[in-house]
Amino acid sequence: MLTPKVAKVERGRRKLAVLTLGAIGLAAALTAAALAAPNRTTVAAAIYVPTDPGYVVATVPARDPAEVAARQALAAAPDRLDLAVELARGDLQRYRALSDPRYLGRAQATLGRWWALAQPPPEVLLLRATIEQSIHQFPEARADLDRVLAARPDDAQALLTRAVVATITADYPAARASCAAVARLASPIVVAACEAPLDAIAGKADEAYARLAKLVSPRAGDAAVRGWALTELAELAYMRGDTAAAAAHASDALALDPDDAYARNLRADVLVASGRTADASQLLAGREQIDSHLVRRAIAEHQLRGPDADRLVAMMRERIAAAAARGDRIHLREEARFTLDVERDAVRAVRIARDNWRVQKELADARLLAEAAATARDSAAAEPVIAWRRSTGVHDVALDRWLARLAAFEVMP
C-alpha cells in the first residue's frame, strides 16, 4: 500500500511531514548544519531542576508489547533486516504524528548496522532518504532516492518521495518525471495529488484544483490517500483566495486523521487569514509540543493578548535559542515567522527568511520572504522570489499582494 505522507515533508513537510519539522540528535547532521548556520543571538534558557522528587517531568506513552517483542528479537538476531525496517518505519510514523525528532534518531539507530554501508539495501536507502529529507538534507535524500530507483525503477514510494524533494528544491522537471512514472503504478488520485503542486506553481492552480476535486470521494483510495489529496485541495484553494473552501478541505483532512499536523497547521493558517485568530489558537491548544503548532499558537495568542501569550512566547524563544545552540537550520521558517510577527524585527526576519529560501523553495517560503521584505521595505531582499515567480508563472493571492506592496514602495517619491 502506498503511504503518500511518507512522500509529503511539513509540506511540512507534508508534504512529507510536512513539515513536521524538528531537530535531530544526529551528530553528522548537526555538525554540517552548524558549519553553515547564520550568526544569530542565542539566549540561554534557564535549566529547571525540580525540588520535589515526586514531580512529573514528562509522561511517556505506554510501549506496544509487539514493538517490545520485535526489538528483543532484533537484539537477538541483529542481522534481521526485515525487523529493523519494520521498527524504523514505525518510528517514522510516530515522528510524523508527533513531530518528535527523537523518533528520527531512533529510526537511524535501528538501521545503524546498514546505515553507512557502501551499498545499503534499497529498503534502508528509502528510509534513510526519508530521514534526510525530514532534516532538510535534500541533496543527500535525492542521491539516495536515485539509487533506490536505479535498483527498483517501479518503487512508487521512492518516486513520490523524489517528486516532493525535487519540488521543494525547485527541480520541477525532475518532479514531473517522477509523477509521470508514478502514473504507471498508482491510482489517478495519487497521480493528480503528485502533479497538483507542480501545476499550481506553473500558474495552473484552477485547472489542478478542478481535476483533483473530481477524484476526491469517500471511496477514492484509503484514508491516507484522501487526506493527502484534501490537503492539496486546501493549498490550491488558499492560493486562489478561496479561504472558505481551503478551511473546509483542511477540516475534512483532520476528520480523517486528527493527528495530521500538516492539515492542522494549514487550517490554522486559513483561519488566521480569515480573521478567526481565536479559533486558530483553540485549534492548536494543547499541542504545543509540536514546534510548528507552538509558533502559530504563540503568534495567535500574542495578537489576541490572550492569557497564555507570555508563556507561549517564552516557550518559543527557548526553542529558538536551543536550536541556535545546536546549529539547527530546520526551523528557519518558524523562526522567521516568529521574528516577524512577535519580535517585530523585520530586518532580522528578512535575513532568516533568505536563509530559509536557500534551503527550500515552497510557496509558503516565498510568501514569507515576500512578506518580510515588504514589512522591511526592502525590495532587493525579495528579488529571489520575484525571479522565481517570473520563471515559473505562479499566481498566488497572498504572494501577489506582498509583491504588489513592494512594487508600490519602489514608485513612491
Image: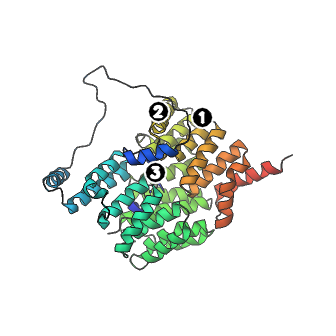
Q: Are marks 2 and 1 in contact (CB under 8 Å)?
A: no
Taking the image as shown, residue 54 lies to the left or right of residue 203, namely left
Which dot, 1 or 3, sits closer to the camera?
Answer: 1
Residue 65 coordinates in the image, percent (x, y): 17, 50
Residue 52 seen from this side: yes
Q: Quadrant of residue 151?
A: bottom left
Q: Of residues 3 and 256, which is closer to you in this image?
A: 3
Residue drawn at x 46%, y 39% is 323
Residue 325 versus residue 115 in the image, above or below: above
Q: CA distance from mark 1 to mark 3?
A: 24 Å
Q: On the image, numbered disc 3 is attached to which residue?
A: 264
Amino acid type, mark 2 = Glu
Q: On the image, numbered disc 2 is attached to which residue?
A: 318
Mark 1 closeness class: few <14, some 14–19, many ≥20 residues within 10 Å? some
Q: Mark 1 or 3 closer to N-term?
A: 3
Q: CA distance from mark 2 to mark 1?
A: 14 Å
Mark 3 closeness class: few <14, some 14–19, many ≥20 residues within 10 Å? many
Q: Are marks 3 and 2 in contact (CB under 8 Å)?
A: no
Amino acid type, mark 1 = Glu
